[in-house]
Image (cartoon, grey):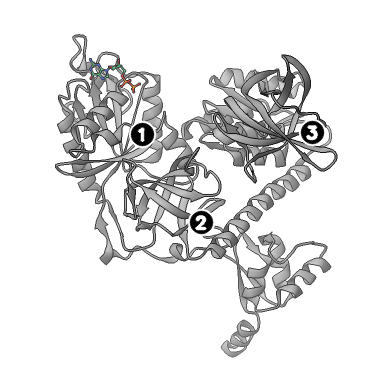
Amino acid sequence: MTSDSQNTTVRRVKPIDIPPVISVSDLADNMEVNPVEVVKGLMRGGYMFAINDVIDREIASIVVQLFGFQANEVEEETSGPASLTVDKESENPDLLETRPPIVTILGHVDHGKTTLLDRIRKTNVVDGEAGGITQHIAAYQIESEGGSITFLDTPGHEAFTAMRARGAQVTDLAILVVAADDGVMPQTIEAIDHVRAADVPIIIAITKKDLPNANIDNVYRQLSEHELLVESWGGDIIAVPLSGLSGEGVPELIENIHLIAEISELKANPKRTARGVVVEARLERNRGTLATVLVQTGTLRQGEIVIMGEVYGKIRAIFDDKGNRINEAGPSTPVEIMGLSEIPEAGTILDVAGTEKEAKKIVDERQTQSNREAIRLQDAHSRGATGNIRQVDLIIKTDVQGSIEAVKNALDGLNSNDTRVNLVHIASGSVTERDVLLAVASEAVIIGFNSSPEGGAQSLANQESVEIRQYDVIYHLIEDISKALDGLLEPEYDDVYFGRASVRAVFNLGRRAKVAGIYVNDGRITRDCTVHVLRNGEEIHVGPISTLKHFKDDVREVATGFEGGMSIDGFNDFEEDDVIEAYSVEEI
Ligand code: GDP
């Protein structure tokens, strides 16, 4: 072939980029053809999709060839098919500025994490702010001589597992707290594994050095057994003995945080649009949804449109970690933002969108994409199901990356000629709503190995009748799965009390539909609960909730002290002063 003829061929068959998933309209755009034609082409191939639907690469390739182009497989951008302008914005090295380190404190329970954090906060509070810091916030910043430090204060390893499970690396430095009198304990080891997996630098804080039975050298020895060699033992790990109670040693700890931060050269560009991560989020009575967000780079401003996973909204107000209203927040700043329509999950990345329309489009596409992913898996599952083989399908979440191999190997032993353990998904992190959706799609059972469901995941699982089993010993897990393969495993359920509400008013919506105006006196009422209606102490109805509202909005739950509206499937007989008790059927 001459080079000329090669050129001719290349010119005719234009390669079209195909990411793992792409919307029909984007694909049409890429090919410069009318999207309606693409939909028709899909139909001819037996696929029913609308213009805004997202299709996978396999189908997209067929379409591309149908239109006479060549398919060029490309890897997806992390943000999904609809990309944000900020993603394309690179960190211009000339604009980078030093940012405060983000520090997480981990360690065994009662080893003094809270005491140490309190001590650090108290001694490093700017005058006059002391009153403002009594509130709990999962991330806050302190000022010290060497500069600001941001602390992440989330329970257990949540900050690590939940956030890392979603690909968010937030911590720059981990402080491992070990009590001098108690030494290395199980949760210390877990913490070490988490920090290792996250590959962040570590400083050891040996707390309670003031106690008479403090044995610092013993702690060093125990740490060395876990390959953490402190400086005085010839290693390069910094260890600072201290007392959270008296404060002795705390300034040295702070100094060392600054030292590690300096070595790590932590930088960000405050001039770009913000990117951050959700540390926690909650619904507050007067202020609505509040998300604690750590700005990682750029500057976040009031009025901006933000996207967090599949939630978006316009920032109505920003508060700093002391509850003061501020207009903007730069890198490493923890803030609370107000104005979201729904509660985003911890660990979700925050991005800024140009317009509300753009944000909506991105969120829509993300939702379609996650639905499609679930459906694809379901297809794969049904294709994989085999006649005579007894198979259990599992989604397994483990506490640490290191457990994955161990669990996999142990389960492998259960495979035989007529039994099969199918691992739909195995990863480290807590059980998320995404896992539950995956379980629905693949009809799998979720196993939490030293890993528990996140807030929304358990209620979604109840609602979707997905089984989540938790284990902390591999042997028990294997025993149960083996029983399941034998068809012996029967889950046990029990009613768990959730909350109580009273009916304050009854509204007629047409002839049949009655809605109760309720006030929640205790606990909470969630959408997926079963409710018992009591009148004068007698139970008159039991059944699922059909609608739950707060003002005009459908909500997942109504908490103590809130009012709401409720209707119940198959029950239309509300009277004022009826008592509604909510229960959830949970596995024991
Ligand atoms: P956490 O569970 O790791 O947050 O531990 P806490 O901070 O709640 O501390 C557990 C207990 O140890 C409390 O009774 C503290 O008063 C005590 N404690 C914490 N740090 C020190 C310390 O440095 N010295 C002494 N003597 N007691 C401490």
Q: Quadrant of residue 527?
A: top right
Q: Quadrant of residue 507?
A: top right
Q: Is residue 384 visible?
A: yes
Asked if marks 2 and 3 touch (Cβ < 8 Å), the reply is: no
Q: Is residue 431 visible?
A: no
Tell me which numbered mark, 1 or 2, is placed earlier along the sequence.
Answer: 2
Asked if marks 1 and 3 touch (Cβ < 8 Å), the reply is: no
| Mark drawn on residue 396 | none
Name the element at disc 2: loop
Judge the density around disc 3: few (<14), some (14-19), many (≥20) Cα neighbours within 10 Å: few
Judge the density around disc 2: few (<14), some (14-19), many (≥20) Cα neighbours within 10 Å: few
Q: CA distance from mark 1 to mark 2?
A: 27 Å
Asked if marks 1 and 2 touch (Cβ < 8 Å), the reply is: no
| Mark drawn on residue 153 | 1
From the viewer's perspective, is the residue at label 1 or at label 2 nearer? Answer: 1
Q: In this figure, which residue is indicated by the disc labeled 2?
A: 78
| Mark drawn on residue 569 | 3
Q: Quadrant of residue 153?
A: top left
Tell me which numbered mark, 2 or 3, is placed earlier along the sequence.
Answer: 2
Name the element at disc 3: loop
Q: Residue at x 73, y 76 (%)?
A: 67
Whether residue 295 sits left or right of residue 233 in the image: it is right
Q: Amino acid at mark 2?
A: Thr
Residue lying at the far top in this picture: please name it: 212
Task: Say if disc 2 is inside 8 Å of ligand 1.
Answer: no
Foreground residue, 306 or 17?
A: 306
